[in-house]
Image (spheres, grey):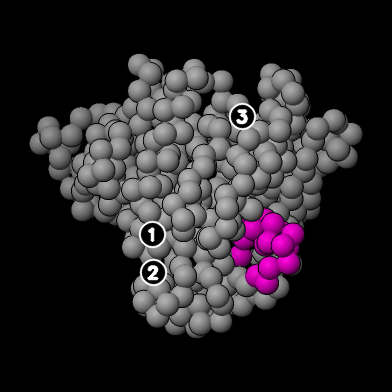
Amino acid sequence: MLGGGQLGKMMALAAHNWDLETWALDGSKSFPAGSAVSHFVEGNFKNFDDVYAFGKQVDVLTIEIEHVNTGALLKLEAEGLPVHPSPTALNTIKDKGLQKQFYKKHRLPTAPFTLFGSGEAIKKAIAAGELKYPFVQKSREAGYDGKGVALIQSESDLGLVIPAPSMVEDLVDIETEIAVIVARNGQGEIKAYPPVAMQFNPQANLVEFLICPAGLDKKIAQQAEEMAVAAIGAYGICGLLAVELFLTKNGELLINEVAPRPHNSGHHTIDSCYTSQYEQHLRGILGLPLGSTKMKTASVMVNLLGEPGHTGPVRYEGLEKCLKMEGIKVHLYGKETTKPFRKMGHVTVLDKEVEKAKTKAQKVKQLLKVKANRPL
């Protein structure tokens, strides 16, 4: 795996069930995956030489983050190493502009968009009347976890315009945001998980609650799964694809963006589905039959984010009170330090009734706080 964060850790834990030897490349063995993988190699996954040397030591190469050196991946793939997702698809996905052009080419519904070479070009288009408020700007590369996104609603927001090459899209009138995790193996078998509804933290633009089932109309849910299946088929990748979608207030589904790896919107599957997203990713990249995506029970996932005003060695407050509650599954990532809105773990709340799970999730959110021993 390129990347040694929490996704790599949870993938390694799934791999241990099958006694698979796992390797990870990242900056420090103190990162979450360091304690879970068989071999941790310290290096830079954005560096050609580090990625190439790492790839020569493994039998199959995958990622837990998109922002890796794809030049090295292309060379490794040309030399016969199975690389998943394919570097060609990854180059498209990691550039939000190319992503949007891909959806347009393959007739996959997405919001109207325009590409700009710089923030100044955006401001000139506004001044010339070629671009109207409100709109959303996304930097074409390096955006992650809400970073690289600017909501521009009026002239007073022009100071928020990102200077980098960007994709600008119309501000969609959103009813709800949903996600579908879909998987594909080398034999072309494809399976989708039930859609989930996402609720975001308004300050950090990060998912705060994730609800499954999503409470969608049956036809909308089926359409969302079909769009995810079409997307992974168009990309032709093996492993997982997380497809984030907007459901507009007039009932239209639009693809927002995708991630070709395990994803925050699939964490609940560890506890609530017959096959976790991590096991499914392994099945996909290793050419094994895909597992069942059926739910065992309803669930609500709560992201554990670092509290505002807290930076330093991590301390979890209220953990014991949460563990006394029925159906609470706590997953701490093992990050040594916290900072405001940093993802430090998640809790999956299980219940036969989704409304009861929502109530318990709100209680977990109130009780379980991620703080620092010495707040800064």
Label 3 CA crowd tier, 10 Å (few <14, some 14–19, many 20+):
many
Q: Which is more N-terminal, label 2 or label 1?
A: 2
The residue beneath circle 1 is 90
Q: Nearer the viewer, residue 299 or 234?
A: 234
Q: Nearer the viewer, residue 98 or 88?
A: 88
Q: Give the quarter of the figure containing the N terminus.
A: bottom right
When the figure is inspected, residue 176 is found, relative to residue 51, above or below; the finding is: above
x and y percent of residue 251 in the render?
38, 18
The residue beneath circle 3 is 212
The alpha-carbon separation of the residues under discs 1 and 3 comes to 28 Å
Q: Residue at x 67, y 38 (%)?
A: 273
Q: Amino acid at mark 3?
A: Cys
Quadrant for residue 74, please give it: bottom left
Q: Is residue 290 magenta?
A: no
**What secondary structure is found at the residue carrying circle 3?**
strand
**Cβ–Cβ below 8 Å for labels 1 and 2?**
yes
**What secondary structure is found at the residue carrying circle 2?**
helix
Q: Nearer the viewer, residue 336 or 322?
A: 322
Q: Which residues are magenta?
A: 4-22
Q: Amino acid at mark 1?
A: Leu
Residue 33 in view here: yes
x and y percent of residue 286 in the render?
55, 63
The alpha-carbon separation of the residues under discs 1 and 2 comes to 8 Å
Residue 141 in view here: no
Q: Which mark is residue 70?
A: 2
Label 2 CA crowd tier, 10 Å (few <14, some 14–19, many 20+):
many
